[in-house]
């Protein structure tokens, strides 16, 4: 981090403004990082999620996290719930091991699409009891995860800032399982944001498999996911344009 200091001082010497972006603005990270370097120099800090009060500090501007433009299509309706599962770049192992075991034991038939990560699809699909599902597709990666999110009734996912941004921008909710060793527990903060705006629930890795089965049965039988399908309070697909306009119009 200290290597940024000469860069910041160089910008100041050249009278060039510093503008920066943080995808998941957790207060402890901001205080440690910004007090040392960024807040000495930054004219504006763009925030991906509204996890701190921007009214208290003019350095911060809530823009959302830049994701590509999304064309929302009408949802397809099925008799059974559709779930998309993705573990992200760091957290796939737990989801690959535990989610199939839980879904095998839920009370209703399901449509499941599971992104397992590099080299994991064969092991994961063999964990599922295939006769329990109306649709079961497991791949290492999907060409367009946005399409899979949109086709699902809800998503089971880690809660990295970009994952939460993508899911909520597609007007979907999630059962979020935060990565337990994420820095300053930022994934838990991201998940709490989604829950706070009524777009999901949280499940902790420390809970048992039976707890997960009960949670999934509750969500599916009560169709809780329908209440999660609402317009997000932030359109992250507009974030890049907002940041560009701030930079272009910066005085």
Image (cartoon, rainbow, N blue to C red):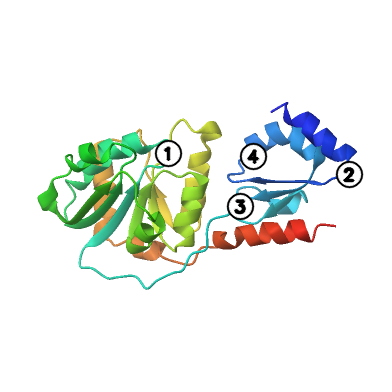
The tag earlier along the polypeptide, 1 or 4, is 4
Answer above or below: position of 224 versus 44: below
Q: Which residue is mark 1?
A: 89
Helix or strand or loop: what does disc 1 sit on?
Answer: loop
Q: What residue do we see at 49% from left, 41% from top?
A: 187
Tell whether label 3 touches label 1 (CB within 8 Å): no
Q: Which quarter of the rendering shows the N terminus?
A: top right
Q: Which residue is mark 4?
A: 27
Q: What residue do we see at 62% from left, 58% from top?
A: 240
Tell whether label 4 touches label 2 (CB within 8 Å): no
Q: Which residue is mark 3?
A: 50
Q: What residue do we see at 54% from left, 56% from top?
A: 67
Between 4 and 221, the one lying in front of the other is 4
Q: CA distance from mark 2 to mark 4?
A: 28 Å
Between 226 and 164, the one lying in front of the other is 164
Between 244 and 143, the one lying in front of the other is 143
**Closer to the camera: disc 2 or disc 4?**
2
Answer above or below: position of 159 versus 174: above
Quadrant of the rendered structure where residue 238 is?
bottom right
Q: CA distance from mark 1 to mark 2?
A: 39 Å
Of all residues, the one furthest to the front in this rendering is 143
């Amino acid at each position: 981090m200290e290597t940024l200091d000469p860069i910041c001082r160089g910008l100041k010497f050249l009278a060039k403004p510093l503008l920066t972006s943080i995808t998941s603005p957790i207060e402890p990270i901001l205080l440690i990082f910004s007090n040392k370097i960024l807040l000495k120099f930054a004219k504006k800090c763009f925030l991906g999620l509204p996890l701190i009060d921007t009214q208290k500090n003019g350095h911060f501007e809530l823009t959302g996290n830049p994701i590509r433009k999304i064309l929302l299509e009408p949802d397809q309706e099925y008799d059974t719930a559709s779930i998309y599962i993705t573990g992200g770049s760091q957290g796939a192992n737990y989801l690959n091991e535990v989610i199939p075991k839980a879904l095998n034991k839920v009370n209703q038939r399901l449509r499941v699409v599971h992104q397992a990560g590099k080299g994991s699809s064969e092991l994961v699909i063999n964990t599922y009891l295939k006769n329990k599902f109306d649709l079961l597709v497991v791949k290492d990666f999907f060409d367009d995860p946005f399409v899979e999110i949109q086709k699902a009734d809800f998503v089971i996912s880690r809660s990295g800032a970009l994952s939460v941004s993508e899911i909520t921008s597609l007007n979907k909710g999630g059962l979020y399982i935060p990565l337990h060793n994420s820095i300053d527990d930022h994934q838990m903060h991201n998940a709490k944001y989604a829950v706070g705006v009524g777009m999901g629930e949280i499940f902790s890795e420390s809970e048992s498999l039976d707890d997960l089965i009960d949670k999934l049965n509750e969500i599916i039988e009560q169709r809780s996911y329908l209440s999660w399908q609402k317009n997000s309070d932030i359109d992250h697909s507009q974030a890049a344009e907002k940041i560009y306009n701030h930079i272009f119009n910066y005085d």
